[in-house]
Image (cartoon, rainbow, N blue to C red):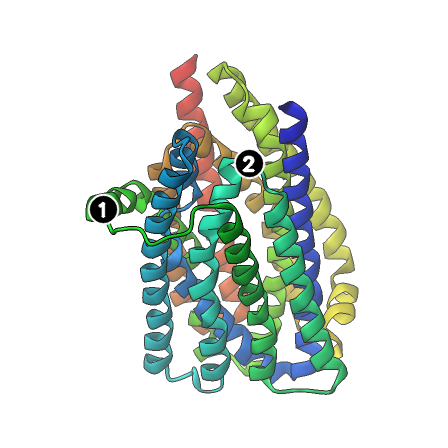
Amino acid sequence: MRRRIASNVSLMLLDRGAQVLVGLGVVAILARALGTENFAAFQYAQSIVFIGASVALICGGEVVVPRLVALGDAAAQHRLLAHVFRLRWLAACGGYLLVGAFLAASPHAGPSWGPALILGLGILLREPSGAVIAWMQAHTHNRPGVYVNLASLTLKAAAVGALAWAGIHAANAYALAVVAEPVLAALLLALYYRRRMPYGRVRHDPALTRQLFHDGSLFWISFMLMMGARRVDQLLLRPHVPTTEFAAYAATVQIADNFTTVATILASGIAPLYIYARGECGAAIRNILKLALLLTALGVLGAGALIGLAPWIVHWLYGAAFAEAASLLRLALMVSPLVFADVGLTVLAVYLRRPRWIAIKWGIACAATIAVDWIAIPHYGAEGAILGYAVASAITTLFGLGMWCHAWRTVR
């Protein structure tokens, strides 16, 4: 069993690592192929879709996987998954409509209409088909899901690269290439599930739907607040700065996000064996602090190295047109160790099953981001947006430390 867990964790780390590398490569190609104006429009569209996609995160794996594990009968599992799919599909439709409503209301969304509506199709595919991923996780059989993700990532990278090689500069064409990833993933997951599970119509049970919605609502709210806190800065920044400055900031965010994703990858690999598997609560809580300190140290070391290389990284990835991003990247990297610390401390809320803590934390962080950006962006532009990012990161880290101190006092 231990070997199987280690194998699944290794596959998960391979999957997340591939996402980081392909993500960086795709963004670099987009920046060079689209130029600053089209790249800015594309990134603005992605930010809108990113926030809209959070609406589809209802009834996540935290709710579905334990229920599937408790259901030994395949037909009962299929019945549950059918209700999960319907709930996620309805939420995804709501998310897509939210994207359209924002585009219609925003006076700055003109060039982003096409890319946003195309990229938004991924909202209708990712989370509903993700019910199959939850089914695989419940059976500790993640290998097929990882292969599906790697295949779809390969298709996206190949499609984006082919467009760039052909000299295409239309943002809509690249949006179609990017959305090819969730299309292929949803198709492969559906084929895999259909071959291995009873496949028939399931009668709708309103009581089960309400229960799934209720049990997943706190995690859902947490995810929406978290994704809002991470992307609302770009929506607030766009009306106040020139296109070149917005493009530089968007490029900075892409690099910083991919760097801080390393913390999530490490935490996902370390936590199952060294925290979740601990029977004694005190030992697990001590290990969470050690994990947070380790991640913070790695964040400091990594940020220090990247700060020195910032001009070279920006030039190598994006080209000379994005030189302005180097100074912004340095500022964002100075904040990134706080994100590493927060990732480690968030494991505590997951271990203790306290989704309310996560919802409160991200609610405060989202409100702080909006407040700081609202004041700072008109005066300082992109640097004001980074100030909002710094304040939100400091708040989430301090909140995590408060959670840890409270938990430690409880078990002592």
Asked if 53 appears above or below 268 in the picture, the reply is: below
Dot 1 lies on which element?
A: helix
Which residue was labeled with disc 1? Answer: 210
Dot 2 lies on which element?
A: helix
Position in image of residue 365 (x %, y %):
40, 50
Q: Is residue 234 visible in the rendered structure shown here?
A: no
Residue at left offset 46%, top offset 63%: 125
Position in image of residue 143 (x %, y %):
63, 43
Q: Earlier in the sequence, mark 1 or mark 2?
A: 1
On-image quarter of the C terminus = top left
On-image quarter of the N terminus = top right
- In the rendered structure, which amino acid carries the disc numbered 2? Gly
Other residues around mark 1 within 10 Å, as few (<14) / some (14–19) / many (≥20): few
Asked where in the image residue 179 lies, by quadrant, the reply is bottom right
Residue at left offset 40%, top offset 58%: 54
Other residues around mark 2 within 10 Å, as few (<14) / some (14–19) / many (≥20): many
Which residue was labeled with disc 2? Answer: 344
Q: Nearer the viewer, residue 39 or 195?
A: 195
